[in-house]
Image (cartoon, rainbow, N blue to C red):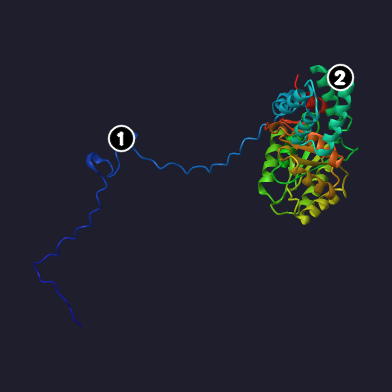
Amino acid sequence: MLLLFRPRGREAPPVTPPRAPDLTGEGGAPAGVVEDEAATTTIPPPAKPVEPVAPPAPVIEIPPPSAGRMVRLRARLARSQSSLGRGLLDLLSRDRLDDAAWDEIEDTLITADVGVTPTQAMTGELRTKVKVLGSRSHDEVRKLLREQLLILVGADLDRTLHTAPHGERPAVVLVVGVNGTGKTTTTGKLARALIGDGQRVLLGAADTFRAAAADQLQTWGDRVGAEVVRKDEGADPASVAFDAVSKGIADKVDTVIVDTAGRLHTKTGLMDELGKVKRVIEKKATVDEVLLVLDATTGQNGMRQAQVFAEAVNVTGIVLTKLDGTAKGGIVISVQRELGVPVKLVGLGEGPDDLAPFDPEVFVDAILGD
C-alpha cells in the first residue's frame, strides 16, 4: 500500500470559487438591455390569421322593358338604310321611267340583299301602279314604296316571342347559330329584355366547347340576377340543357334560355348533336322557341346557314344582329321568304339593351326617311 504524506509546514493553497459571469452593465443595469423604456424592444404576440375577404356581390341591374325599343333605336337604322330609300325615291321620282330606270331600281334592291324573286315581284307591282298614277309627286312615290316594302317585309306575320310559362313548366327558348354571329351575347341580351318585362329567367350554358362562352353567359346572368346552369368544358351539351330545364321547373322560373355551341354548318355531326339537345330537352318540357341568330352583315352568305339549321331543328324565329351596321337590310325580306320564318328580334348596337322586337313599320320608315 502506498501512503502519501504532505510535508509539514506547507499549507494547501486556498481554493478560489468560480467567478459568476458579470450580467450587469454600467450603472448596474443588466448587460445588453437599455434602461430607456421607450427603446425597450418587446416581441409582439403572434398575428391572428387573416380571413379571406369575399369579393363584393355584383350589382343587380334593372333593365328597361322591351316595348318601344325599336322606335328608340330607329335613328341607328336610318343611318345605315337611308341610302337604299333615297336611291329608290330618286329613281321613282323621275319624269320618265324607261326600261333602264327600272333596271336601276332592280339593281338597287338586289344590291340591298332583297333577293331576285322578291325584287322582280316588287318592281312588277310598282310598274303597274306607276302607269295608273301617271304623274307622281314625291309623297305619292313614297307611299307606293312604303306599301310595297311592307308587303315584302311581311307586316302581317306573327312575330310573337313565346316566352310565357305553361302552368308549372317554364317556356324554353333554344338559341342556335354559327360562331361569330353574336349568339351568346344575344342570349344574354334576351335574358335582360325578359327580366325587364318582369319575368324570372334561368340560363343554360350548353356551349361547352368554348370555355369563354359559359363565363360570358355567367357575366350576363350576374348583372341581372339570372342563375346560370353550367358544367366543365367538354361536358355533354345535352346534359347541361336537361339540367337547366330541370332546375327551371324546380325553381318555377318563367323562361329557360339555352345557349348552344356555335356549330359550323359544314360539320354534319355537330348538327346532329344540336338535334339531340332539342330531343333531350323535350323529355322534360316543350321547346317553345328555336331562335336562329344570323349576322346581317353577311348578307346572302347567311342564307345557307339558315337553311341547314332549319333542317336540323324546327327554327321558329330569326334574330338578325348588326342590322345597324349594314346597308343591306333586304336580308330581312330574303331570309323570311326562304325559310317561311319571321324575323322576331334585331340587334341594333353594342349596348346591353340594343336588342329589340322587330317592328316592320319602324324598319320601313327608317329606310324611307321622314
- Element marked by disc 2: loop
Write down the residue under mark 1. 36
Q: Position of residue 82 (x, y in %)?
A: 72, 26
Left or right? Give the position of 351 relative to 310.
Answer: left
Q: Is 171 placed above or below 268 here? A: above
Q: Earlier in the sequence, mark 2 or mark 1?
A: 1
Write down the residue under mark 2. 134
Q: Position of residue 136 (x, y in %)?
A: 83, 18
Q: Residue at x 39, y 41 (%)?
A: 42
Question: Quick one: quadrant of the C terminus?
Answer: top right
Left or right? Give the position of 258 relative to 158.
Answer: left
Q: Are marks 2 and 1 in contact (CB under 8 Å)?
A: no
Tell me the amino acid under the disc marked 1: Asp
Which residue is the extreme one toward the bottom?
A: 1
Tell me the amino acid under the disc marked 2: Gly
Residue in front for this viewpoint, 47 or 274: 274
Q: Position of residue 242 (x, y in %)?
A: 81, 49
